Image: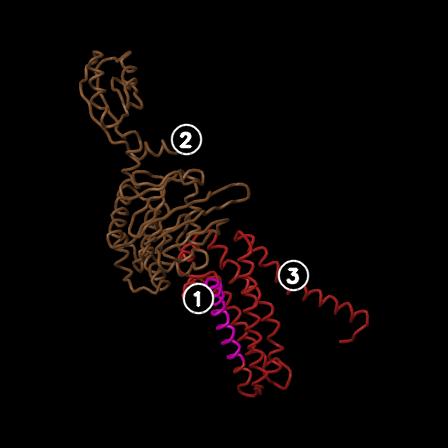
Chain colours: A brown, B red
């Protein structure tokens, strides 16, 4: 079953193309990370999902309902954490949650929800006195009302400290285990890496790639980074390493050599260095982070 | 669904001190006139004459309150971003608009209606005469007039992009169409009577 289906979805603002023929399918039950630098078109895409913006071309549906023609029906099934919102000045945290409960005709307990997002003790304070992080938790709470089938979250961790971000991820995992589909955008890569089944990378309004993190890694030259401590100058032997097949890059950095290569080429690198008379004091490997992939994918488009 | 918006918006509006104050001023003015009219007005004391007596006060104050209630209904929430919280919930644009209109007209209409009925009672008691149909129509017209001004304020609130613009254009309308025309009408009348074209 399909949670989100976009077909040739485009948005133009005068001469600027914000979204260029996006085809995207998000399946029910998955956690999908929508990744891209600021200004790539992530928010435009989400705003079209929420019917805050009309597409210039193409269409998108959520759980079988067209987002533009059946907006109210769509928004009844989803929970939303938008970006660029502000809380209602005169209402308390509890009243915000109650407003969402009435609007969705749900029967949640406001205090339980506030407790879940970690601001129970501030329930009866005016939301205008909340910090940015507390407001973000509050609006996440509003999104959780009615146990929606799909959560749409635009930059959910913005304004949260590392602890808050970790709690946010825990909540997203719980929601996913309950059966909810999660679609969220972020420009912070670790967040996406930590919770997503699949990611879509958006660059200048175009969907550059959609894949699982594992596949993205393997498509990136094996995705292994080898860090070798030598204790001495390496001189000419870097070129030897670069000459090996399956080695992408080799850089010397403070008596340490950083080599990106496929998994299989690791030993060849060590052996080659040894043969060249370089002392290998120590070495370790790192998995290529999503950040490396992200740079790889998006740098070419610039 | 508009009920939810209306309740929500009513909370936000009635909470505002300036709105409370202005609605009270309108209501007390009407009551005061209801008290003064039997004492000062010309005989016979009837609700029909009283309506003439109170019309000027209502036409003067209601536009200001209506605009004040309406002008920031949408634009200020759009400027701050809290409108987004309503738009991402299952509300249609129409429900939000209707809810806002009702949330803001109900306090004004209730206060105005109640004040007029109480003032009518003050006129009738002890010596006045109640012309029921006539008075009921007057109260209804006054209520429509109040709704009209809140609607104008709301329309301005939807069509402009900042709260400041809404305030300026919101108050330009009654200034021109109510107070402006009123003054012109008076000037013309004074002019006409002083030149002897009309008398009295």
Please name whichever residue, B197 or A255, is drawn nearer the observer in this view of the structure: A255
Marks 3 and 1, Cα distance to the nearest angstrom? 33 Å
Residue drawn at 36 percent across, 31 percent down: A296
Instruction: Indicate the position of residue A291 as horizontal and vertical percent values.
Output: 32, 34
Please name whichever residue, A223 or B128, is drawn nearer the observer in this view of the structure: A223
Q: Are marks 3 and 1 in contact (CB under 8 Å)?
A: no
Q: Respond whether the residues carrying marks 1 and 2 are from the same subunit.
A: no
Q: Mark 1: give few (<14), some (14-19) or many (20+) Cα within 10 Å.
A: many
Q: The magenta stretch spans which residues?
A: B94-119
Q: Quadrant of the C terminus of chain A?
A: top left
- The answer to which of marks 3 and 1 sits earlier in the sequence is 1
Q: Which residue is mark 2?
A: A300
Q: Which residue is mark 1?
A: B2
Q: Residue furthest left?
A: A281
Marks 3 and 2, Cα distance to the nearest angstrom? 60 Å
Instruction: Determine whether, in the image, residue A126 is placed left or right of residue B19.
Output: left
Please tell me in which quadrant of the rendered image residue A239 appears: top left
Of all chains, the one bearing label 1 is B
């Amino acid at each position: 079953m399909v949670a989100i289906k976009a077909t040739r979805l485009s948005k133009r603002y005068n001469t600027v193309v914000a979204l260029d023929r996006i085809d995207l399918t998000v399946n029910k039950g998955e956690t999908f990370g929508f990744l891209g630098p600021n200004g790539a078109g992530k928010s435009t895409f989400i705003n079209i999902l929420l019917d805050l913006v009309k597409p210039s071309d193409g269409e998108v549906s959520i759980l079988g309902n067209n987002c533009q023609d059946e907006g109210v029906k769509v928004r009844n099934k989803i929970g939303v954490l938008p970006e660029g919102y502000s809380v209602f000045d005169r209402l308390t945290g509890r009243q915000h949650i109650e407003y969402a409960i009435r609007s969705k005709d749900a029967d949640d307990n406001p205090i339980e929800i506030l407790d879940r997002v970690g601001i129970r003790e501030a329930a009866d304070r005016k939301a205008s006195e909340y910090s940015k992080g507390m407001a973000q938790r509050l609006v996440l709470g509003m999104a959780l009302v009615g146990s929606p089938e799909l959560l749409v979250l635009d930059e959910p961790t913005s304004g949260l400290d590392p602890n808050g971000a970790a709690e946010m991820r825990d909540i997203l995992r719980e929601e996913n285990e309950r059966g909810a589909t999660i679609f969220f955008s972020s420009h912070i890569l670790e967040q996406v890496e930590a919770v997503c089944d699949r990611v879509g990378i958006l660059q200048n309004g175009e969907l550059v790639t959609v894949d699982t993190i594992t596949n993205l890694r393997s498509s990136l030259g094996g995705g292994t980074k080898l860090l070798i401590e030598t204790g001495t100058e390496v001189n000419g032997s870097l070129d030897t390493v670069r000459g090996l097949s399956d080695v992408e890059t080799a850089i010397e950095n403070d008596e340490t050599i950083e080599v990106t290569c496929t998994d299989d080429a690791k030993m060849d690198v060590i052996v080659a260095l040894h043969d060249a008379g370089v002392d290998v004091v120590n070495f370790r490997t790192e998995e290529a982070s999503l950040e490396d992939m992200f740079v790889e994918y998006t740098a070419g488009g610039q | 669904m508009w009920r939810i918006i209306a309740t929500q918006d009513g909370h936000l509006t009635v909470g505002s001190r300036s709105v409370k104050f202005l609605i009270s001023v309108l209501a007390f003015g009407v009551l005061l006139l209801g008290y003064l009219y039997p004492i000062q007005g010309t005989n016979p004391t009837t609700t029909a004459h009283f309506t003439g007596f109170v019309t000027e006060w209502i036409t003067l104050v209601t536009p200001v309150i209506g605009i004040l209630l309406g002008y920031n209904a949408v634009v200020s929430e759009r400027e701050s971003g809290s409108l987004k919280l309503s738009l991402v919930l299952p509300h249609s644009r129409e429900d939000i608009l209707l809810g806002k209109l009702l949330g803001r007209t109900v306090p004004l209409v209730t206060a105005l209606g109640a004040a007029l009925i109480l003032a009518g009672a003050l006129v009738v008691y002890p010596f006045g005469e109640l012309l029921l149909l006539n008075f009921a129509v007057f109260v209804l017209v006054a209520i429509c007039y109040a709704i009209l001004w809140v609607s104008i304020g709301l329309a301005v609130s939807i069509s402009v992009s900042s709260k400041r613009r809404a305030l300026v254009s919101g108050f330009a309308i009654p200034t021109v169409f109510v107070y402006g025309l009123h003054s012109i009408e008076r000037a013309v009348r004074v002019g006409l009577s002083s030149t002897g074209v009309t008398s009295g």
